[in-house]
Image (cartoon, rainbow, N blue to C red):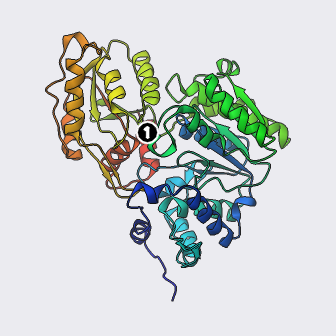
Amino acid sequence: KQMIIKTFKQVEQFLALHIPKNSQQTFPGEFGLKRAKHFLQLLGNPQEKIKVIHVAGTSGKGSTCYLISSLLASQGFKVGLHQSPHLTDVTERFQINNQNISKEDFVDYLNKIIPVINRKDVINHVSTKLTYFEILVGLAFYIFSEKKVDYAVMETGLGGWYDGTNVVTRPDKLSVITKIGLDHTAILGATIEKIALQKAMIITPKSQAISIYQEPKVEKVIRGVANIKEANIVFVNRLNRLNRLNRLGLIGEYQKENAGLALTAVYYLSLRDKFKINQKKIKQVFETAHFPGRFDVKKIKGKTVIFDGAHNPQKMEAFIKSLVKKYPGKKFNFLLAFKKGKDYKEMLKMIISLVGTSKIILTSFLTENQDMINASEKPEVINDQLNQLNRSQSVKSVGNKNFCSVPIIPDLKRAWDAILKEDGIIVVTGSLYLVGEIFRLINTTNTTNKQILSINKNK
């Protein structure tokens, strides 16, 4: 008897059964990719029925995907967008023209593929129980193919080579590579070259790839992979044409790079697929672009609050540069939590040497509605690190201010209430999961993106 899901609550319960318990299960490497391919085969290989733009990289993937999707939609196309993780609601992973699909739609499509998910196939004596991420990627390809999208923009979960999204063999898949840096080193390898290899392996044979300008050793790896695969690769600088375009709605210097990359991808597609670009519409996209959780400025209870999911030193550095540029001479109060295993020492250095930093509150999070159980590093551990940094001379403590007595409020709701009482600008950063959990707090009544977006539009 086939199980049928009726409510969204049941969806979350069903998906929770597939959340891996450890990173071995979360990132099963080559075997996971075989399993993902097997799953898609059982679904009729929907990923081969659509034109795919596949995006990998360490920093800027999310914004680049969002922009490519918005730009193509502005040209009159029907565009699927799959991103991860979601901030508040799993339907964010299935967008058509930058709108989440409805919960009803989501439940319908999930019910159609449940028999396939529940099959007890065994490949090479290993169970094929799919992970949460693999199910949702398969579902995204299935939904986009059923809805007959003109293009599907797919963000890799982690790495690229063995990622559940790396299942398209069509030579017209366009691979896009954003900035590569050190992150997830335990899984992807400890050197930047190894990481670059993982990302570059999304390039399909005899296809086109576009990468942001990379440091020489990274560029060398990407070129090497492209050569072996007889693929064509282009490296893009921050585009001059952007200076002619109006101001970027996405605040942040680094967004110019993502915008340049996204624009190049769309120009390439217009040449390949022979459509004429409407420049006015492109300009509109850049004026109104808003990507939740990335330099996301809201007015809450009369306070300016900036949310940014920066979770590695490369992202944090870019975020802080933009922060200082946009709010020179202002005071900042930080609410921080970092996921276990992140390089928080480097990120803390940047935060405490920022002249405007006036207060830091440390908190914690635990997500239950994501690809894996994401627990934050214990705030006490972060605090020890802060104290060490204070004692070492390597960091100029701001205006001789000492961050030895940092309030630790593990309970997220209490930490949020406490930071809202501070004077000055409030900054919530260190993890996209932290940002998502706070968004859930703000929107406990209604967790749709629309509501989050409307807070922004009315500021």
Farthest residue to the bottom: give it. Answer: 1
Taking 141 as reference, is 58 left or right?
A: left
Look at the picture and state if 196 lies above or below 140. above
The 10 Å Cα crowd at callout 1, few under 14, some 14 to 19, many 20 or more, is many
Q: Which quarter of the image is occupied by the C terminus?
A: top left
Q: Position of residue 16 (x, y in %)?
A: 40, 66
The location of residue 271, given as percent across then percent down, is 84, 37
- Camera-nearest residue between 171 and 305: 171
Amino acid residing under circle 1: Gly
**Could you tell me which secondary element the residue under label 1 belongs to?**
loop
Residue drawn where x is 77% and y is 41% of the image? 228
- Decide: is 275 above or below 115: above
Query: Which residue is tagged 1?
Result: 293
Q: In this image, 20 relative to 353: left or right?
A: right
Vertical position of residue 254 compared to residue 86: above or below: above
Judging depth in this view, the residue of 215 and 118 nearest the camera is: 215
Residue drawn at point x = 67 percent, y = 56 percent: 167
